């Protein structure tokens, strides 16, 4: 799915002193961070599809900072200077000046398609990254300003490097139904304190994981429940369900728009070790529009739990009697079914006449079981539906009139 340039990253990392202001970046420490945490993040997360080679031709973290002047002109003829509110031209000017300084030192800058500039604190606390979408072979860049520690560095770097791989922000809703640009707290492209795996939608888009199943209308017969067992997103290169609502919805969903059901199994040793409590061992549903160039933000719609009565043993036993049931959704905001019954929030109204019900989550076994039902309508069953032997409204009861 990604361009050739991304199979092995070719990354140059420079500490940049601007106008006599020294970058706080400790490049010796950065070398260690790249060789360990950054390398692990990308190689583990991509299940080896994306390599971060320690060879200097591929990863070059330059120990001595480069120094650039207080002002200059970009290759497009735009003046740049020192500011804590840089626009694109200013960022480009800093980058070009840093490239020139590195070249003067004999570093073959042009062979590195990804260039990272660790700037002095005086440019502020922000970071920026080239959004490489639609994916192209052009040089991509990351700039970071004030960074207070390794966790913050990592957090910013995997976010901006995600942009370099073509990712947009991972959005999500708050509890009152407001869409937030960084609203997915389980994805570095949203807002995470410590890197986690990129969410299922991003991960499939990157080609890091392949869906266990791609489901169209014909795979989800109307009024019937189909059970799936899902692996953890950070456990296997094959995980999550990719659903194509455009194959049955006449409006609102294009044929390339996706819905993902994924299992965020927490383990201190997988790439989801950074998940905060709220997202550990949940079933997630993301919506990912794929209009035109495919460069769209995925949206986290819900995090689901196992029903309170289900324990891990029941989930693992695989008994189909565990099938859909209407009761058991209680306990504050915890829910095991989406859309949440009665909810008027946009994250629930987004359902394309599809109900997802968690049957069980077995974190130890690394398997979660969910049941999917495609509804004729969300209102009560009536008329011929009362005797057709189907659960037309997917409320868990057949012929419930
Ligand atoms: C930079 O990091 C290295 C490696 O962690 C450490 O030994 C060194 O003391 C640090 N230098 C400064 C100036 O903090
Ligand atoms: C790195 O690049 C140099 C110069 O082009 C080349 O001689 C060397 O073989 C390369 N190393 C690897 C491992 O590709
Ligand atoms: C940094 O992240 C690690 C987990 O990766 C955590 O154990 C540690 O407490 C964090 N440090 C700070 C200063 O937040
Ligand atoms: C539950 O949702 C309500 C609003 O619907 C919100 O005010 C509250 O903070 C939520 N509680 C938790 C624990 O998330
Ligand atoms: Zn961003």
Image (cartoon, grey):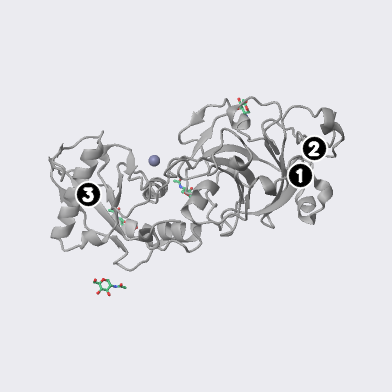
Residue placed under numbered mark 3 in the picture: 16
125 sits left or right of 90 in the view: right
Between tags 3 and 2, which lies in front? Answer: 2
> What is the C-alpha distance between the residues marked 3 and 2?
63 Å
Residue placed under numbered mark 1 in the picture: 225
Residue at 70% over, 26% down: 342
Placement of 383 over or under 53, stated as above or below: above
Placement of 163 over or under 380, stated as above or below: below
298 sits left or right of 214 in the view: left
Residue 320, label in figure: none
261 sits left or right of 139 in the view: right
- Mark 1 closeness class: few <14, some 14–19, many ≥20 residues within 10 Å: many
Residue 391, label in figure: 2
> What is the C-alpha distance between the residues marked 1 and 3?
58 Å
Task: Say what secondary structure mark 3 lies in.
Answer: strand
105 sits left or right of 88 in the view: left
Placement of 253 over or under 267, stated as above or below: above
* Quadrant of the image containing the C terminus: top right
Q: Nearer the viewer, residue 328 or 166?
A: 166
> Is residue 22 visible in this depiction of the protein?
no
């Amino acid at each position: 799915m990604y361009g050739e340039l991304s199979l092995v990253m070719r990354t140059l990392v420079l500490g940049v002193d601007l106008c006599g202001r020294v970058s706080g970046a400790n490049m010796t420490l950065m070398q260690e961070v790249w060789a360990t945490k950054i390398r692990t993040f990308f190689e583990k997360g991509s299940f080896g599809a994306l390599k971060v080679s320690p060879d200097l031709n591929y990863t070059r973290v330059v120990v001595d900072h480069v120094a650039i002047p207080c002002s200059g002109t970009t290759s497009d003829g735009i003046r740049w200077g020192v500011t804590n509110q840089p626009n694109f031209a200013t960022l480009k000017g800093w980058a070009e000046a840093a490239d020139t300084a590195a070249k003067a030192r004999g570093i073959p800058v042009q062979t590195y398609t990804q260039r990272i500039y660790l700037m002095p604190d005086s440019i502020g606390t922000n970071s920026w990254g080239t959004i490489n979408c639609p994916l192209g072979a052009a040089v991509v860049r990351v700039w970071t300003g004030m960074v207070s520690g390794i966790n913050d560095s990592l957090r910013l770097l995997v976010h901006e490097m995600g942009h370099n791989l073509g990712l947009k922000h991972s959005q999500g809703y708050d509890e009152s139904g407001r869409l937030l640009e960084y609203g997915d707290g389980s994805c570095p492209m949203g807002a995470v304190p410590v890197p986690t795996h990129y969410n299922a939608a991003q991960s499939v888009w990157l080609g890091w994981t392949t869906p266990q199943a791609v489901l169209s209308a014909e795979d989800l017969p109307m009024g019937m429940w189909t059970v799936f067992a899902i692996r953890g997103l950070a456990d296997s290169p094959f995980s999550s369900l990719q659903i194509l609502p455009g194959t049955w919805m006449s409006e609102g969903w294009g044929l390339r728009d996706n819905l993902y059901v994924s299992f965020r199994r927490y383990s201190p040793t997988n790439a989801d070790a950074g998940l905060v409590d709220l997202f550990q061992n949940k079933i997630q549903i993301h919506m990912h529009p794929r209009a035109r160039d495919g460069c769209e933000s995925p949206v986290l719609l819900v995090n689901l739990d196992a029903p309170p009565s289900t324990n891990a043993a029941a989930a693992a036993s695989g008994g189909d009697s565990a099938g859909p049931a209407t009761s058991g959704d209680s306990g504050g905001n915890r829910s095991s079914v989406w859309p949440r019954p009665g909810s008027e929030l946009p994250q629930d109204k987004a359902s394309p006449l599809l109900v997802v019900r968690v049957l069980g989550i077995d974190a130890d076994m690394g398997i979660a079981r969910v049941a999917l039902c495609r509804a004729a309508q969300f209102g009560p069953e009536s008329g011929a539906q009362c005797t057709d032997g189907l659960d037309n409204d997917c409320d868990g009861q057949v012929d419930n009139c």
